[in-house]
Amino acid sequence: MSRPVADLQPHLSNRAFNALTRSSWDRMGKLERGLYQTIEQVAEASDADLLDLRHLGPHCLAEIRAAVRTVLGERPTPHRPVRGSDVEAWIQQAREAHEPGSGDEAQTRAYEVLDDLLNDYCRRADQGLPLGQDVA
């Protein structure tokens, strides 16, 4: 069952909603209805197609994608770890900041937890598994 694009309106800024539904004049001077009539059409559209819409930039694109997921009841795509990413670097930096050595148990425990987290992140990156999915 198709849902009208108007069902997205409560979840979008005026700019994003208007970009999706704006009518325009074609080359022959005929008024064309908005390109997207259903939420399913918006969901199937590529990012490039949506970014081609007048007054629609990356921020509105992200807003539209989130609204479509919300209305269609989809869960957001989980983060996929990547070797050498900013996330991996952040975990390494946090782990190094808690390097054991002073005999402080809390410091040692924090290091161990961050080390386990880093190992899990790297294992997921190597196996191509998103966060939240069980690792074998």
Image: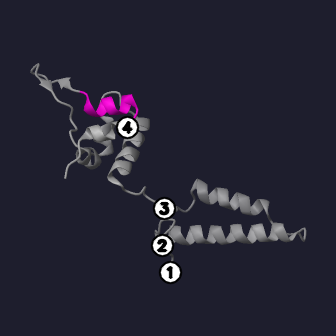
User: How far across and how far down the image is residue 131, in percent?
Assistant: 51, 65
- The residue that label 3 is drawn on is 80
Magenta stretch in the rendered image: 12-22
Q: Residue at the location (37% across, 29% down)? A: 14
Residue type at the position of mark 1: Ala
Q: Which label lies toward us, 4 or 2?
A: 4
Q: Which mark is residue 127?
A: 2
Secondary structure character of the magenta stretch overall: helix
Q: Nearer the viewer, residue 87 or 30?
A: 30
Secondary element at image label 2: helix
- The residue that label 1 is drawn on is 136
- Say which label, 3 or 4, has the lower sequence index: 4
Outermost residue toward the top in this view: 29
Label 3: how many Cα within 10 Å (few below 14, some 14–19, many 20+)? few
Secondary element at image label 4: helix
- Say which label, 4 or 2, has the lower sequence index: 4
